[in-house]
Image (cartoon, grey):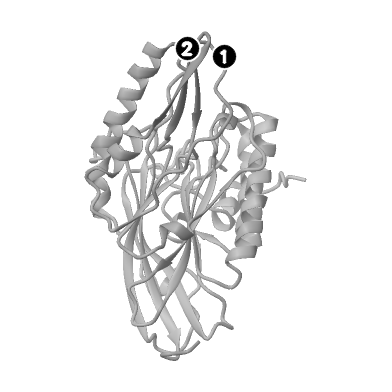
Amino acid sequence: MVRRALSIAAAAMLFGVTACADRETVTDPEAAGNLTATADPIDSGDFLALTYNVHGAFEEVPGTIGDFVAAYREVIDRQRRISPLLNDYELAVVQENFVARLVLNFGFFKVRLLLVGPYTALERSALHQYRSGYQYPQAPPLPPPTDLDVSFSDGLVRFSQMHFAARDLLRESWGTCNGNDCFTRKGFSLARTQLPSIEPLTVDVYNLHMNAGDTENDFAARLDQARQLSEAIEEHSAGRAVIVAGDFNLNPFAANPEQAEHDRAILEELLQRNGLQDACTVLSCCDPNPGAPNACDATQVDRFLFRSSDFDQPQRVVLSPRSWVAKRRGTEFEGLSDHAAIVVRFAWQLFGTVGAP
C-alpha cells in the first residue's frame, strides 16, 4: 500500500527527484555516492553522459498519407538538428527516436516500407565510434487502419566513445503497457560498456522509456515495468556497477497528488530493490519545497540512476556523480524537444589489485 505519510522533504532524501532549473550542480566526487573504500584507487577517470527524449513521436495519430508525411518530415528535421549536439558527450542515450514500419493499403494489395529517416538523421553528424543501431518495428498498427498502418520501434538509441558491442546489446520490450504506449515497443536496452581504464573495466548501462499517463492503468503499467527492469538487473548485473538512464515517466512531484503518490512509491521500490541512487538527489539539484526558487519540477521525468559494484568484487568500480544539469531553455537544446536534456558527469574509481580476475 502506498505510504501516504511521506513528506515531500523525506521524499527528496529517499527517492530520486529531478530539478526544474536549467542550471548545473557540482559537488566533490569524494563526498558523493557511496564512496567508502579506504585504499587508494589504482585507476580513475570521468565521463560526460546525456539522456534525452528527442520527441520523435507524432503529436497526433496521422490518418492519411499526407498527414503522415508532414509529421514525419518535422520529426526528421528535429533529429537532424539534435545530431551534432550529441558530440559533446562521451555517452548519449536517447529515447523516442522511432523507426517506423508503414503499410499502405491499396485495396487488393499493400505496400510495406521501413522508414529509418529519424535514425539516420540523428546519427548523421554524430562522431561516436560505437552506436546501437535501431530496433526493427513489430508493434501492432496504429488505429484506425484506414489507408495506412504504422508501427514503431522501441525508439531507444545510444552513442558512445566508450566501447560496447552492438551485437551483444540486449533489448527487452515491456510485458505490460497501457493506451497509446502499446503502439510502440517501449522497453529498455542494456550494453556492457568499457571504461577507459588500465584494466578491462565495464559498467552496465541501461536505457529505458516507461509508460506515460496519469490513470490507474498507467500507474499499474509503470509498476510492472519497474519490476521487470529490477528482474533484469538482478539477472544480468548482479554485483556490478550500473547506470540506468532515460525517460522514467515517474514524477514524485506531479501536480496530480495521486500520480505523485504512486510514482514516489514505484521509484522508492526501484531504488531500494537495486541499491540505486538518483544523481540529482545525491547532488541536491532541487528543493523539494513547493514555491522555493529552485523547487523540484512538477513535469521532469528524465533521470540518471547509478550504483557502484559490490564490495566483495576482486576489483570494485565506484561511481559518483560530479555534476548535474538540465538543458532546455536558453541552451542549444531549446525548441528541439518537449523534454530537457539531462547531463551528468560521472567520476569512476577502480579499487583492488591490478590483474585481479
97 and 221: which is toward the camera: 97
Secondary structure beneath dot 2 equals: loop
Dot 2 alpha-carbon crowd within 10 angstroms: few under 14, some 14 to 19, many 20 or more: some
Secondary structure beneath dot 1 equals: loop
Q: Name which residue lies at 52% across and 86% down.
A: 314
Question: Residue 223's x, y, as percent?
Answer: 67, 44
Q: Name which residue lies at 42% across and 80% down.
A: 350
Question: Residue 253's x, y, as percent?
Answer: 54, 40
Is there CB contact under 8 Å for labels 2 and 1?
yes
286 and 90: which is toward the camera: 90
Q: Is residue 322 above or below residue 210?
A: below
280 and 100: which is toward the camera: 100
Kind of residue at badge 1: Pro
Residue 99 occupies quadrant: top left
Evaluate whether residue 13 shows in this view. Answer: yes
In primary-sequence order, the first of circles 2 and 1 is 2
Q: Is residue 72 above or below residue 80?
A: above
Question: Residue 280's x, y, as percent?
Answer: 44, 55
Residue 144 badge: 1
Residue 175 occupies quadrant: top right
88 left or right, relative to 265: left
Q: Residue furthest top?
A: 107
Q: Quadrant of the N terminus?
A: top right
Kind of residue at badge 2: Gly
Q: Is residue 161 above or below residue 74?
A: below
In the rendered image, which residue does mark 2 sit on? 63
Evaluate whether residue 92 shows in this view. Answer: no
